[in-house]
Image (spheres, helix red, strand yellow):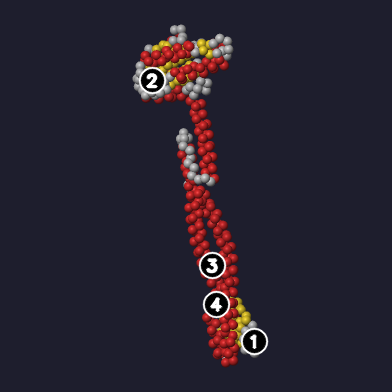
Amino acid sequence: MKLGIFLKFVVLFAIMAIVLGAVGVFSYKNYRQQHYEGVASAQLATAVVGAAGMLDKAAQAGEKEIRDSLSLFAMFPFLLCVEMTTASGEFYRWPPLPCNIIKEEKYPLNYANVLADGGDLRFYVSRQWVIEETDREVRVGIIAMAVFLLLFLVGSGLVFHRVVGHPVGFLIKSLRGISQDLTQQELIKKLTRDEIGELTDALNGLLGRIREYQSELVRLANTDGLTGILNRRTFFAKGEALLSKYENNVYFVQIDLDHFKSVNDNYGHGIGDQVLELVGRLLQGSIRTVGEREPDLVGRLGGEEFGILLSTENLEQARSVSERLRATLEKSEVDTGAKPLTITGSFGLAEAMPGESLDDLYHRADAACYEAKRNGRNQVVVAS
């Protein structure tokens, strides 16, 4: 199956994932920045509580001790500088470089009255550190999301292929095969019990109806609509195949019903149709349909003309079959509502010569049939 549907699914899912991922990353990044700001504040608050006593002693000892004590806060990687103001207004800074000229984005954390004498501490936290820590987490999250998305797409692709792709591909392949040969009778195999399985059942039902209509169309195209025997076109097509298969012992019997025009004139076309139907049934029921050789053929060639192509052992046997058919017609009757109507026919019999075409064989049998009519009708004449 082509990947068109699956690719559309992947593109749509990827767009949705990108949009949702971008929103998620933006929200997560803001959340984690606040988290790391809180981490810095909490760690400094803990350090201030622990270092308050030490800073009080340093304030009493002198400026050097104060700066040394403030330098201990360098253990925090996010701290840019720290400032201390005593209750008496004395100001100390570590590192000595003024915090306001440090070329990095920062924000202050103020702790008022944390010293014994009521002094204040101010810490300048590196916003760059917060951003870097947040970006590091976001990168890890994006990589994890990408791996998950890749695994999801691969897994969903396998599931899609098994659940949708393979059954639909099998349906397409089966329908293409059927479209190339509508005569095949196999139904499409049902692979699933879901909607695709229901689609398979519906297609099989449709194929069944198509084949029924196809069989009916073939029957209508090959048979005479009134008598049900072969029509002229199919009779000659099958006859050519029979004649080309057997070089000898093939015989054409041409039959023309006697006085059929008077039947239509005197009894109407309805009775005439009944006569034709009866003759078709009698001829079809009297020919050979099984045996080592191909079955005999019988067809309506037009109007009251019928043709039979026999495959027998010799001319005498073909003549015997023709006489039997003539006698069967002579004994048959059609109910007209008044007196029964008898049927007779004139028969012309011709044996196929080596290399002779079916058309030439037909014309010789037809000439013998007309000779039978000239000789008084209701008889069999063998072509010379």
The alpha-carbon separation of the residues under discs 4 and 2 comes to 109 Å
Q: Name the residue under label 2.
A: 311
Give the residue at x 61% y 83%: 121
Q: For the residue carrying disc 4, how many other residues have a C-alpha within 10 Å: few (<14), some (14-19), or many (20+)?
A: some
Q: Which of marks 2 and 3 is nearer the N terminus?
A: 3
Foreground label between 4 and 2: 2
Q: Hey, what amino acid is under mark 3?
A: Val
Q: Hey, what amino acid is under mark 4?
A: Phe
Please state, as top left, top right, bottom left or bottom right, where the C terminus lies in the image.
Answer: top left
Secondary structure under the numbered disc 3 in the rendered image:
helix
* Horizontal relation, residue 169 to residue 28: left or right: left
Secondary structure under the numbered disc 2 in the rendered image:
strand
The alpha-carbon separation of the residues under discs 2 and 1 comes to 131 Å
Question: What number is the disc on residue 138?
Answer: 3
* Horizontal relation, residue 250 to residue 62: left or right: left
The alpha-carbon separation of the residues under discs 2 and 3 comes to 91 Å
- Tell me if residue 24 comes above or below residue 40 in the rendering: above
Foreground label between 2 and 3: 2
Question: What number is the disc on residue 118?
Answer: 1
The alpha-carbon separation of the residues under discs 4 and 3 comes to 19 Å
Of the pair 370 and 182, the residue shown nearer to us:
182
Q: In which quarter of the image is residue 249?
A: top left
Secondary structure under the numbered disc 1 in the rendered image:
loop
- Tell me if residue 131 comes above or below residue 300 in the rendering: below
Give the residue at x 53% y 46%: 194
